[in-house]
Image (tube, rainbow, N blue to C red):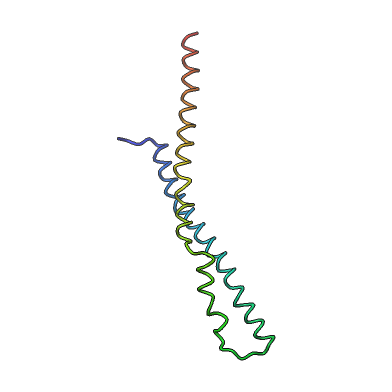
Amino acid sequence: MRTSVAQRTGIVASVIWFFVGFSWSYLHETNAASELAVLRPQLCEQRRDQEQSWTKPDHCWDTYTKDFREIAPHPAANGLFVGLAPIPLAWLLALIFVRTARWVMYGRWKRRRDD
């Protein structure tokens, strides 16, 4: 079965959307989680500097990885959802649009032929 130009364009757009949507969602979530996870170690360092305590230097940053994983436990799963979920919806809307346009054009053609 041959695909039309519109179908090939839709396939290419779907593939591009998947990669762009996945990448955007993954990067957005990991950057936001990193910004939030870095706050606790920074506050710990500020408090340590104010109190003049001599704890080990990495003490404040030991919790960073654990905090990061708590804030964003599955960034790839969310990225897959954002990358894949809109594709069937977009194809459905395109199908509705094309069928409606053909129906309207067929009605105009039939009315002109009957006149």
Q: Quarter of the image holding residue 71?
A: bottom right
The answer to which of 99 and 50 lies nearer the viewer is 50
Residue lying at the far top of the rendered structure: 115
Residue lying at the far right of the rendered structure: 50
Residue 78 percent location from the top left of the image: 48, 56
User: Residue at 45% of width from left, 60% of height from top?
Assistant: 76
The answer to which of 67 and 23 lies nearer the viewer is 67
Q: How many marks?
A: 0
The answer to which of 73 and 82 lies nearer the viewer is 73
User: Residue at 51% of width from left, 57% of height from top?
Assistant: 25
Residue lying at the far left of the rendered structure: 1
User: Residue at 46% of width from left, 51% of height from top?
Assistant: 83
User: Residue at 62% of width from left, 80% of height from top?
Assistant: 44
The answer to which of 28 and 68 lies nearer the viewer is 68
Residue 98 percent location from the top left of the image: 46, 30
Residue 2 percent location from the top left of the image: 32, 35
